[in-house]
Image (cartoon, helix red, strand yellow):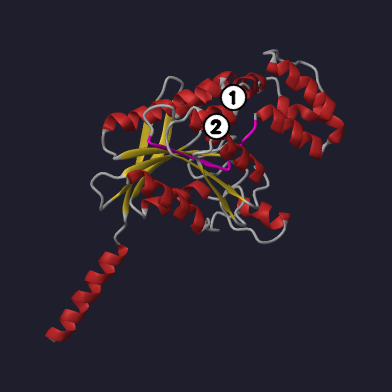
Amino acid sequence: MNIKLTLILTFISTFAVAQEKYYSETELSIPTNSVTINGTLLTPNFVKKSVLLILIPGSGPTDRNGNSSLTKNNSLKFLAEGLAENNIATYRFDKSVLSYTKDNKEKIDYLTFDIFIEEIKTVIQHFKMATTYSKIIVAGHSQGSLVGMIASTTDVDGFISIAGAGRTIDEILVEQISKQAPFLKDETVRIITELKKGNTVDEFNPMLISIFNKSVQPFLISWMKYNPQEELKKLRIPILIINGTNDIQVSVTDAELLHAAKSTSQLQLIENMNHIFKEIKGDLNENMQSYYNPDLPIMDELTSTILKFISEIRI
């Protein structure tokens, strides 16, 4: 009887340890001058003072998990959780456009790239003042890469660019439209030339409305003035640049341009990784389908690469 009881107690104890999470999850909202940023803080349970990684989402109305109304892939959620399981605190958040209420939706039309930058600076300051973390690392994905590198000139101990562009957005737009609709290239160049002068454009080919909608033009004007290569040069902290070889949105060339602009940076190209961190060995269709698969895990190499970079900063 005693033997059976001992075995049962041992099983219960072992099961409890196995079920114990490596981190705690807290909903955290941070007020900024523009809007309140809503996010999730993951805190390791077995580290007194951990490194914190602030994860900035990419373009569009992207939420803290890397999802939007059109796609659901949980890319940022998986990355944050993978780091937290390895004793790195993470804060990921919804893009500010998702935080506007029905009463102030018109404010979205007045958003600029600079507002995004100021919001991230406020988030960084929030955690810096908390003095809870041994180091603060900023990691920006896609559009978030440029936002993050501009915001990281002070109070940040390291910067990570994940699938970040190495060229200005106007150059990228001309390239993409030229490939997809060559007959619209001249019209695109005309519009961008005016935007770079600070002028909005009222009349243009309706086929370009999704890109150059009048309400979006002020945002594009503010975005175009930043050159990622020049902004990266301003950082005086350790830098890691990551890109996947199967990224159909941001090419390996962009990562190489960033690396060339800052020779002290580390460059890691992850074989077969796509824009949302998933392993793709098949065709374009497989790549696109991964954007709608919330259960497909991200590549372990991404997490291990970031962990290695952080460990070197901590030395």
The furthest residue to the left? 2
The furthest residue to the front? 263
Residue at 67% across, 20% down:
217
Q: Position of residue 203 (x, y in %)?
A: 80, 17
Residue at which label 2 appears = 146
Q: Position of residue 103 (x, y in %)?
A: 51, 21
Residue at which label 1 appears = 226
Return the residue nearer the eye: 103 or 227: 227
Question: Can residue 296 be seen from the camera position used here?
Answer: yes
Note whether 36 is above or below 311 in the view shown. above
Return the residue nearer the eye: 301 or 315: 315
Residue at 75% across, 27% down:
209
Q: Position of residue 7 (x, y in %)?
A: 20, 81
Q: Kindly indicate the quadrant of the structure image that contains residue 166.
A: top right
Task: Sort mark 1 into few (<14), some (14-19) or many (20+) by Cα contacts within 10 Å.
Answer: some
Q: Secondary structure at mark 2?
A: helix
Note whether 23 is above or below 188 in the view shown. below
Q: Position of residue 30 (x, y in %)?
A: 37, 29
Q: CA distance from mark 1 to mark 2?
A: 8 Å
**Sequence order check: which comes first, mark 1 or mark 2?**
2
* Residue type for callout 2: Leu
Q: Provide the residue span drawn in magenta.
A: 157-167
Q: Are marks 1 and 2 in contact (CB under 8 Å)?
A: yes
**Where does the N terminus fall, quadrant-wise?**
bottom left
Return the residue nearer the eye: 224 or 35: 224
Whether residue 47 appears in magenta in the rendering, the answer is no
Q: Secondary structure at mark 1?
A: loop
Residue at 58% across, 43% down:
163
* Residue type for callout 1: Tyr
